[in-house]
Image: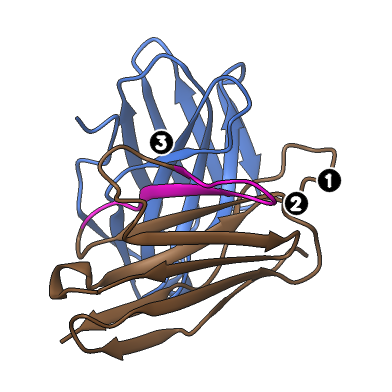
Amino acid sequence: GAVVSQHPSWVICKSGTSVKIECRSLDFQATTMFWYRQFPKQSLMLMATSNEGSKATYEQGVEKDKFLINHASLTLSTLTVTSAHPEDSSFYICSARDWGRRDNSPLHFGNGTRLTVT
Amino acid sequence: DQQVKQNSPSLSVQEGRISILNCDYTNSMFDYFLWYKKYPAEGPTFLISISSIKDKNEDGRFTVFLNKSAKHLSLHIVPSQPGDSAVYFCAARVQGGSEKLVFGKGTKLTVNP
């Protein structure tokens, strides 16, 4: 079945540094990927939609200059948290859909990245 | 404004019994609903879905019911097993083909042996 791989699974960084998170679709092409964030005991909140070959679409309240998204190929999207601060500590999850399937297949999620900013 | 609500943060049931997880929504433009299961430190795993034109979808031990007039859906797990213990998220998709999902806060299900 479709698999979405996310790396790293966890990262600890110092305040002010940048962190890059990778999301790969392993056995299908994904022209669109989605980046979610989950704070403790909260729902997954969509941050942005990553579009292959074009600019990402950000949800209201998400700073595009802080959360840089690059979708350079049909199987890879990256999220870079720039100048990270402790309040950016969260669980970041990417997702993608196998558009090659004709049925109404659901979004598949990566295993997430636990970011801790000290 | 929470468009998808899971009002029970937790649920505990005995093995072999039925688990019923509830979800309410406010946006009448949702046309597709999904349930995801999530273990700690992992991403959500798709469980079952239902289109807004249906009122029931069944897959093995899992059944999802949709009541459009009440803007309510529920997930039934029968019989419940200890391995079902996880956080269950209800998610909804806005009509129009977008893949953007709106999630509830989740319900932590514990199935006791």
Q: Nearer the viewer, residue A8 or B4?
A: A8
Residue type at the position of mark 2: Asp
Q: Secondary structure at mark 3?
A: strand
- Residue in view at x 38 percent, y 67 percent: A92
Residue marked by disc 1 = A101
Q: Are tags 1 and 3 found on a single chain?
A: no
Residue labelled with disc 3: B74
Marks 3 and 2 belong to one chain: no
| Chain identity of mark 3 | B
Q: Nearer the viewer, residue A106 or A82?
A: A82
Q: Which residue is mark 2?
A: A98
Q: Position of residue B77 (x, y in %)?
A: 48, 51
**Label 1: element kind:** loop
Q: Is residue A53 magenta?
A: yes
Of the residues shown, which amino acid type is indicated by label 1? Answer: Arg
State the image coordinates of residue B41 (x, y, percent, origin top left): 38, 78
Task: Kindly indicate which chain is depicted in blue in the rendered structure.
Answer: B
User: Magenta stretch containing residue A48, yes or no?
Assistant: yes
Question: Is residue B80 visible in this depiction of the protein?
Answer: no
User: Which chain contains the residue that carries disc 2?
Assistant: A
Q: Colour of chain A?
A: brown
Task: State yes or no: discs 3 and 2 in contact (Cβ < 8 Å).
Answer: no
Mark 3: which amino acid?
A: Ser
Point out the stretch of residues depicted in magenta. A42-57
| Marks 1 & 2, CB-CB < 8 Å contact | yes
